[in-house]
Image: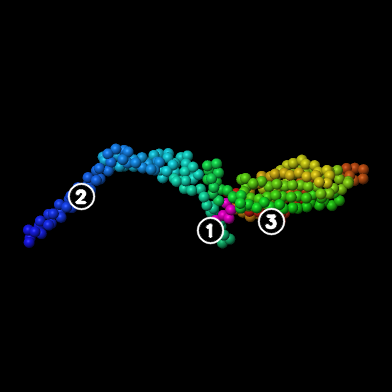
Amino acid sequence: MKTRNIIISIILILIFLFSILLTSCDEESECQMNSDCYTTKTCRIGKCVNEMCQFDYKDDCCGNNKCETGENKCTCSDDCGACEGKITYNSTTSTGRVKIVEANYARNACVSDKCSVVVDAADKTSLKLSNEMDIRSAFKIEILTTVNNPFDIRSDKANVRITLKDIDTDVGGVNINNIQILSGAEQMGEKIIAKKLNSFGDVFTEELSLTSAQSLIETTKKITIKIGYDYVLQQRDQQVVMRDDSDFSLSEKIVFVNP
């Protein structure tokens, strides 16, 4: 009986050693040449070394899991991550606590192969806001301001159309000298012009680029249009130059996006 158990133990040991030998043989015969280590990954190179496949990654290759010089989220999202999603930024509450806020409109998108902050055209509303300048016993002007809401500081423009609605017979035309767009004391845009309105229906339009001294990516502001003008008024036997400016607040607040 004892001899039988010894024989069985020897057999089991031999089987175990044989299985290790088979496994070792399989590992050693993994490949015979480089082509046996084929890979579908563009940046991965397979080599047969001592009958075992070894894999290395190419440098400066999109897909090697390294965001290298010349690559970015738009040219190689596999290595650098995707350029997508709404922007988040830090905002300080009235109690001094800093919280993370998700922007309502600003989001990441690829522009000319660069990850940029943009506003979708579908999110914009074109506002046409009208004001009236009525200078007693002189003239009346309509001011139509067209502006996107939200307004992308980098790409959008504000358009101001000025139309002469009425003019007194003693006024020899109205000169519009400059247009300013303000938010409180902040001047967001200005254009120096030299336009003259002589008769009813005379009209012109000016386009203004805007800047915004805001600390957050998105800020809501109330803006004002300021018009500088002069005109010649005939008083008895002499002409008097009248010079002044007038400002008008737009009826709606505008969300400005400034990355």
Q: CA distance from mark 3 to mark 1?
A: 28 Å
Q: Residue 51, which numbered label?
A: none
Indicate whether residue 105 is drawn in magenta.
yes
- Is residue 7 shown left or right of residue 149? left
Lower sequence index among marks 2 and 3: 2
Query: Depth check: 63 or 241 in front?
Result: 63
Indicate whether residue 86 is drawn in magenta.
no
Q: Horizontal and vertical percent for residue 80?
A: 46, 46
Q: Horizontal and vertical percent for residue 138?
A: 85, 49
Q: Kindly tell me whether residue 83 is visible in this rendering.
A: yes
* Residue drawn at x 70%, y 49% as measured from the top left: 146
How crowded is the residue under tag 1: few (<14 C-alpha within 10 Å), some, or many (20+)? few
Q: Residue 252, which numbered label?
A: 3
Q: CA distance from mark 2 to mark 3?
A: 81 Å
Which residue matches tag 2? 20
Q: Horizontal and vertical percent for residue 1?
A: 7, 61
Q: Are marks 2 and 3 in contact (CB under 8 Å)?
A: no
Q: Are marks 1 and 2 in contact (CB under 8 Å)?
A: no
- Tag nearer the camera, 2 or 3: 2
Of the residues shown, which amino acid type is indicated by label 3?
Glu
